Image (tube, helix red, strand yellow):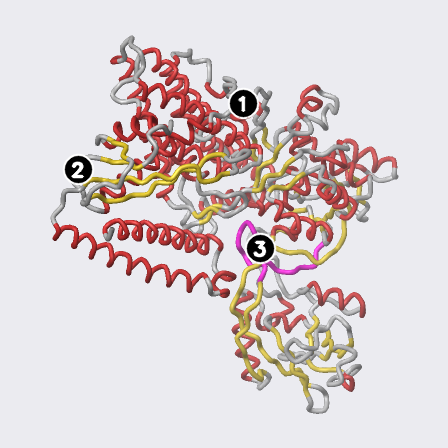
Amino acid sequence: LQDILARYHRMKGYNVCWVPGTDHASIATEAKVVARLRAQGQDKRALGREGFLQEAWKWTEEHGGIIVQQLKTLGVSADWQRYRFTLDPPLYRAVIETFVRLYRDGLIYRGKRMIHWDPVALTALSDEEVIYKEHDSQLCYVRYPAENGEYLVIATVRPETILADVAVAVHPEDERYKSWIGRKVRVPLTERFIPVIADEAVDPTFGTGCLKVTPAHDPKDYEIGQRHGLPIIDIFTPTAHLNEQAGAFAGLSREAARSKIIEALANEGLLEKIEPYKHSVGHSERTDAVVEPRLSEQWFVRMKPLAELALRAVETGEIRIVPERFLPTYRHWLENVKDWCISRQLWWGHRIPAWYAPDGRTFVAATAEEAHAQARAAGYDPTALRQDEDVLDTWFSSWLWPLSVFDFFEQPDNPDFRYYYPTQVLVTAPEILFFWVARMIMAGYYFAKEKPFSVVYLHGIVRDKLRRKMSKSLGNSPDPLDLIDRYGADAVRMGIVMSAPAGNDLLFDEALCEQGKNFCNKLWNSFRLLQLWRERAQDEPPHPLHEEAYQWFEQRLALLQKEVESLLSAYRFYEAAHLLYRTIWEEFCSWYLEALKPTPSRNLLQKVEAQAIHILQLLNPFMPYITEELWHLMTGAPENRFIHEQPLPSTKETVDWTLLDAVDLAQTAISRIRQAKQAFQLPTIPEILVEGDTSDPYFSTLARWIEHFIGAPLRIVSSLPPEKFIRLTVRSTGVKAGFAERAVLHQQVFYLKADLSQEKWSQLLELLRKEKAQAESFRDKLRQKLENADFVQKAPQAVVEKERKKLHDTEARLQMLNEQLEALMG
């Protein structure tokens, strides 16, 4: 989509700058490198930081260029000489400078908080890096014995954390448990007693109304623990195995411990019952591991002051989000934003520029030399400083992209930054609206005091036919280069764009690529015909039909350009692609070139070729390879000139609606006559009679086009024809007042002569009646389905729209069948 915009705006005369680049993907890359080292019998820690980083750079050099190669093969016309990588020295320095500045401004701090922990990647995650999925779990009702033989029953989906319980909480207004407040109960499977406390955070309607409080392993429990001064017992290792605090269960994974503890509870008579329970569980966006709430000291960005900048920009309309339906989601996230955890327990990435003295004093500086100077000034021994081992979240570099790619942090007043910033359009996916888009807006306003872009266009997510997100782990993500090898880059581009309504998910099917390939073949063959005509064309006056067809398509081409420009200006790529596809396939190939056969005159052909080149220009943003090849073939332009650098032709301001309506009437008539010929199984059409006014100027156009396309003579009559004729009504519409306001302009009746036996007439009549009955039955079923509110509300929008289209097509088919029956029955 970015390439469509870039190519289109170059043709409109804009100085387009599109900076390509990639981020270093710290979590994903480190996981790949660690896995490769493990396969080679090496260990990350044993290798050491510098040795590991060398291996990471090797992996990046081997694999980091794959996506760039895919983009280039797709024909992406980015400014490749400007390519940037988030670990390039200038961008690296920008990240470090940003951290230092925000720290000094009081917007970055280090603190112990409950964070999301990825036990596979062994790193903290931000809230936005956690994806919630529905899980079918077990709700275990566990007895917590009291001193006198009584017990409280607590419902939990995480019995493996029972050994870390430090209290049982009830709601202070819950009459069932008021007498229990202040008493003690024993933690099951231990001899440890814990207090029963009252806290308003407890939901009396969940389970039994009693809550086991485990501050080390649940955010809500942690807050309760802080309010009541409760101790913290952490029973998990970084890999989510139980540690020595778990006694006999130490060393087990979470899942194995859950089963063993449920078994032990049952053996001791402490398991009252188990119920099936469905709930949302957080997964790491990168590794898909179930994340573990963990109390950890991390670095955070205070988001509220920054979020206010990003919210105001969109609320005031200074930045526009397309489609607008994402605005409520954007607003909700910014109004409820939490501080951003930016530290990651990894080595691949931007190392946090913080140094610690032996007593814990922190010095934040852009370089080690500056940190040493700070320490020396504070009376510390610089040689005793230790730099933070962690790196920054990858998004902490990506949020600076509109600034750092133009070297804003190196030289704020440099010409490139002043010329290109703020940029115009960002095209991205809704799933990173908060990861990236909102944060870029914050960074733009905070550092440059200006918006980073004016429009954010959010495209859909590519999914498979089962509506699953494309994923290598699911094996449903085809290699783009493989698709290009089989279908061609243009076919892949066109097929995908034609299936991607704004903001809606794209249900990928290779049939889309096949459709794109067929379109390429159709286009190529049409230009081969033009070249053939070059060899055959003669210096002669143009045929009246050819001249009329040329004038008609000149009008259609002007309207096409206006419509395409309007759609692209509104970021309606899907509709623009469909419009071009239909116009080129149906109007240019099926009507226009067919009307010009067998060969137009040489003078007319030159004008026809200019129209064909105009079509190539409009299509180039969508299909760059074939249009570039055909443009060079038709124009003989040198290799250093490109079609997307040529300005779009100016179009006529006035529209000859009379001509357009006349040809539209002729084309409608031809299509209906062809349909009737097929429906009535007519081998030939000896004659076509038209009942109407012979002085009507539309009849000359009608006669020329019908005679050329049908091959049967057309005769105008003023009285009803004899028997053995099939009556066919053709309607045409024209302008009544103002653009796009239509009214019935003509109504013509055609009579197709058919010399058939009486038996054949009867067979046709019976065939049509059966077909009508089947169509009516199918229509009724579709109506019943679409009148079902439950289906319309719960079914995917694409499915509902498909059923509506079926109904529309069936009703149109019924109308035609009724007309045919009426014609046969006189």
Out of 696 and 270, give the one closest to the viewer: 696
Magenta span includes 810: no
Nearer mark to the viewer, of 2 and 1: 2
Question: Which badge, 3 or 2, is on the more N-terminal residue?
Answer: 3
Residue 641 location (% of width, % of height): 46, 14
Q: Amino acid at mark 1?
A: Glu
Query: For the residue labelled by badge 1, is the local secondary structure a helix, a strand or a loop?
Result: loop
Out of 198 and 149, give the one closest to the viewer: 198
Nearer mark to the viewer, of 3 and 2: 2
Q: To which residue does mark 1 refer? A: 653
Q: To which residue does mark 2 refer? A: 684
Q: Amino acid at mark 2?
A: Thr
Residue 625 location (% of width, % of height): 40, 25
Most extreme residue toward the front, as rendered? 719
Residue 721 location (% of width, % of height): 23, 41
Residue plotted at (25% across, 31% down): 714
Vertical comparison of 131 with 62: above or below: below
Most extreme residue toward the bottom, as rendered? 148
Residue plotted at (58% across, 27% down): 18
Query: For the residue labelled by badge 3, is the local secondary structure a helix, a strand or a loop?
Result: strand
Out of 381 and 749, give the one closest to the viewer: 749
Q: Are marks 3 and 2 in contact (CB under 8 Å)?
A: no
Residue plotted at (87% across, 39% down): 378
Vertical comparison of 400 with 164: above or below: above
Question: Which badge, 1 or 3, is on the more N-terminal residue?
Answer: 3
Question: Which badge, 2 or 1, is on the more N-terminal residue?
Answer: 1
Q: CA–CA distance between discs 3 and 2? A: 64 Å
Q: What residue range appears in magenta? A: 281-297
Q: Is residue 442 visible?
A: yes
Q: CA–CA distance between discs 1 and 3? A: 52 Å
Q: To which residue does mark 3 refer? A: 131
